[in-house]
Image (cartoon, rainbow, N blue to C red):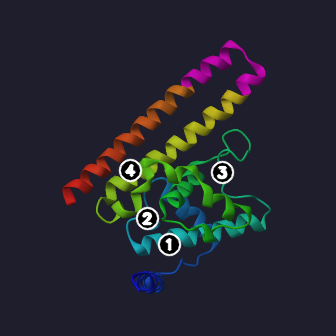
């Protein structure tokens, strides 16, 4: 009985939630760029903002697929150096946190985003719950996590090149990139701690 009631409540909530907003691809591209920068209508703190974000993902993804481009670029699935952009990483983190749904993506990406390793990060797991209480902190954590993804992917790609080519100059660049990864991770963890602290104060 309880399970049936929970199912009914979940379906009712889903029916009442705003549907993804329809928009032209050009508008979607601009919205996603602003989202990656931590501003604009496509935010994660409100149901309306999440509907805008999901609509932007749907529209932009459909346009990219129509042009024969796989989007977003997902770490560990290949690609050119520096191929994971700030927008890619921001959308992936939002997906891992539950703000964007797998059904919002096109083609092979729809299956891939269902298995993002980011979803298991302790910094990411509570973001959706915290968004309504610690909005500013969650937005900052979203950006910090995306930056960590981008820097980590750059390090991975540089390490692969260093393994193939070697050389002192490349080794120095790799060390500098490693330092960037460490700083990005520390910032992400700091912001996650701020989110947790705000949640504890709230309740």
Residue 68 screen position, x and y as percent: 80, 62
Q: Earlier in the sequence, mark 1 or mark 2?
A: 2
Q: Earlier in the sequence, mark 3 or mark 1?
A: 1
Using residue 195 as the reference point, say whether residue 144 is left or right of it.
Answer: right
Q: Is residue 123 magenta?
A: no
Q: Nearer the viewer, residue 67 or 8?
A: 8
Front disc: 3 or 1: 3
Instruction: For label 2, count other residues whose C-alpha is less than 10 Å away and answer few (under 14), some (14-19) or many (20+).
Output: many
Residue position for label 4: 140
**Label 2 near label 1: C-beta < 8 Å?**
yes
**Label 2 near label 4: C-beta < 8 Å?**
no
Residue position for label 1: 52
Residue position for label 3: 74
Does the magenta stretch mainly form a helix, a strand or a loop? helix
Front disc: 4 or 3: 3
Q: Earlier in the sequence, mark 4 or mark 1?
A: 1
């Amino acid at each position: 009985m309880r399970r049936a009631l929970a199912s009914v409540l979940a379906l009712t909530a889903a029916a009442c939630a705003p549907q993804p907003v329809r928009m032209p691809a050009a508008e979607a591209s601009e919205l996603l760029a602003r989202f990656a920068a931590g501003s604009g209508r496509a935010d994660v703190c409100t149901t309306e903002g999440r509907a805008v974000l999901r609509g932007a993902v749907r529209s932009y993804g459909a346009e990219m697929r129509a042009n024969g481009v796989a989007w977003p670029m997902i770490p560990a699935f290949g690609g050119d150096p520096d191929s994971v952009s700030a927008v890619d990483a921001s959308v992936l983190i939002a997906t891992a946190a539950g703000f964007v749904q797998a059904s919002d993506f096109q083609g092979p990406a729809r299956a891939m985003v269902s298995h993002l390793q980011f979803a298991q990060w302790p910094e990411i797991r509570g973001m959706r719950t915290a968004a309504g209480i610690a909005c500013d902190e969650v937005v900052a954590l979203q950006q910090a996590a995306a930056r960590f993804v981008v820097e980590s992917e750059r390090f991975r790609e540089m390490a692969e090149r260093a393994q193939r080519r070697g050389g002192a100059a490349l080794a120095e660049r790799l060390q500098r990139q490693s330092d960037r990864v460490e700083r990005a991770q520390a910032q992400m963890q700091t912001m996650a701690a701020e989110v947790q602290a705000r949640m504890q104060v709230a309740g």
